[in-house]
Image (tube, rainbow, N blue to C red):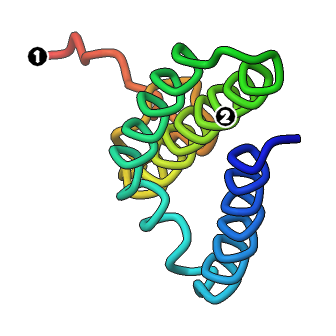
């Protein structure tokens, strides 16, 4: 294993530890808004992972690039799923379509009276 790959692996492991430490300090109530706010950053990370994977020359670097692209894609998709769920929570009951869970029941209408 060459020194450059060992340095990159060391940076990756340290970044994982720092990420776990930072995320574990975020209160649960703030996690969803922070996740939706960082979707753009995850998109930039995905583009960077694709660029790095495209320039890979050795099989080890190609595998690491593929793993990076896969994880970044999962992160972007997960961020949009969390954002969609969060936005669903803020919709009013009347904004949901008919047949949706917790949708208000339609009231029965009475026939118009024909008496004069």
Q: Nearer the viewer, residue 92 or 13?
A: 13
Q: Vertical placement of 43 versus 16: above or below? A: above
Residue 111 image offset from top left, x and y in percent: 35, 16
SS at mark 1 in the image: loop
Q: Please identify the quarter of the rendering in which residue 38 is found.
A: bottom left
Residue 3 image offset from top left, x and y in percent: 75, 50
Contact (Cβ within 8 Å) of mark 1 with mark 2:
no
Identify which residue is drawn at 75% across, 74% down.
Answer: 17
For marks 1 and 2, give the one nearer the viewer.
2
Q: Nearer the viewer, residue 63 or 19?
A: 63
Quarter of the image with the N terminus is top right
Quarter of the image with the C terminus is top left
Q: Vertical placement of 80 versus 32: above or below? A: above
Q: Please identify the quarter of the rendering in which residue 15 is found.
A: bottom right
SS at mark 2 in the image: helix
Identify which residue is drawn at 71% across, 70% down.
Answer: 14
- Identify the disc placed on residue 116: 1
Mark 2 lies on residue: 68
Residue 82 image offset from top left, x and y in percent: 55, 48
Q: Nearer the viewer, residue 48 or 94?
A: 48
Q: Please identify the quarter of the rendering in which residue 10 is found.
A: bottom right
């Amino acid at each position: 294993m060459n020194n450059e790959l060992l340095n990159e692996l060391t940076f990756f492991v340290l970044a994982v530890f720092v990420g776990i430490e930072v995320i574990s300090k975020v209160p649960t109530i703030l996690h969803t808004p922070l996740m939706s706010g960082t979707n753009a950053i995850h998109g930039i990370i995905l583009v960077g992972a694709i660029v790095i994977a495209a320039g890979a020359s050795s099989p080890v670097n190609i595998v690491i690039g593929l793993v990076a692209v896969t994880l970044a894609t999962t992160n972007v998709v997960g961020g949009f799923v969390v954002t969609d769920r969060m936005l669903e929570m803020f919709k009013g009951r009347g904004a949901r379509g008919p047949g949706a869970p917790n949708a208000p029941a339609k009231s029965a209408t009475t026939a118009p009276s024909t008496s004069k």
